[in-house]
Every structure is written in C-alpha cells, then in structure tokens.
Amino acid sequence: MFLLHCPYCGEHRDEEEFSNAGEAYIARPAVPEEADDATWGDYVFMRRNTKGWFWEQWQHTAACRKVFAVKRNTATYEIAGSWTLAEGKALFEADLALARARSTVPDAAHAQAGVPAKAAAPAQEARQ
Ligand SMILES: [Zn+2]
C-alpha cells in the first residue's frame, strides 16, 4: 500500500482511492487510417511491463475521477511525482530522450549502417 498525490485535489491519499489506468503517453499513430494492422494492433493492445521506473496513468476514482500521470518505480514502489497529463508530458519526453541517448540498441538509421547508436553519439562525449 502506498500514498499517491492527486495533482487536481492537491492531497496525498491512500492507493485504494485510485485505479491504475496503465501505461502513460502511448504514441497514437499520426494518421490512424494509414496505419497497417500490425501498427494499429500494437497501439491498441501491446503494453510494456517495465521493471523499474515507469510512467503510468492513475485515476482518482474515489474523488475527482480525473486521470493524471505518475512516475513510479514498479520494483520499489518509490514515486518520483505525479502531474496532470499535460504537465507530465514534457518530463516524460525528457526521460525518453535521455533513455534513447544512453541506449546501446541501434536505431533504424544506425542499424542500416551497422553502427551502434552509442558509437554515433556527439563528438563532445567521445572526447571525455
Ligand atoms: Zn483527485
């Protein structure tokens, strides 16, 4: 059991007042009519099951009923914070950019060239 802060009510309340609404900030295909079945299926059904820091949506079902974003560690239950979906979006995108910068998984462009993404990092990092 843990406490969640509702950014709308402005209070820390017991977890039992809230409902987990799943992964936050899932990217919807820009033009849904043009998405193939696999892309649309991934958007509708596929969710990450991350161990560690994870952006989730929670709904304050016992009070204001609003949905908001929570950055929570799924392994330790530590909570970094909670924000309205609009407020949290910029923080989520900053986390995503940082994760991509640290990733050694080649992205599509680097995979074609056979160069891991980390090797193509800015020259500033290579000088250190
Ligand atoms: Zn609330």
Image (cartoon, rainbow, N blue to C red):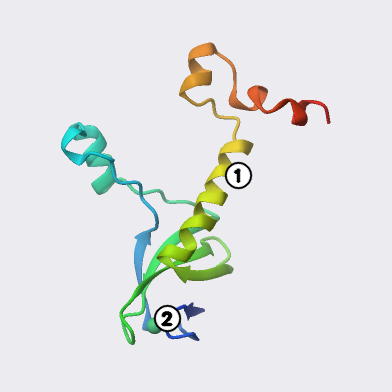
Residue 15 image offset from top left, x and y in percent? 44, 80
Q: Quadrant of the C terminus?
A: top right
Residue lying furthest top in this view? 113
Say the numbered circle drawn on residue 115: none
Give the CA distance from mark 1 to mark 2. Answer: 28 Å
Q: What residue is shown at x 50% (from left), y 79% (from top)?
A: 5
Residue position marked by numbered label 1 in the rendering: 98
Residue closer to the observer: 17 or 68: 68
Residue position marked by numbered label 2 in the rendering: 8
Residue type marked 1: Leu
In this rendering, does residue 1 appear at all?
Answer: no
Q: How many marks?
A: 2
Residue 54 image offset from top left, x and y in percent? 50, 57
Residue type marked 2: Tyr
Q: Which of the 4 image quadrants contains residue 101?
A: top right
Mark 2 residue CB less than 8 A from any atom of ligand 1: yes
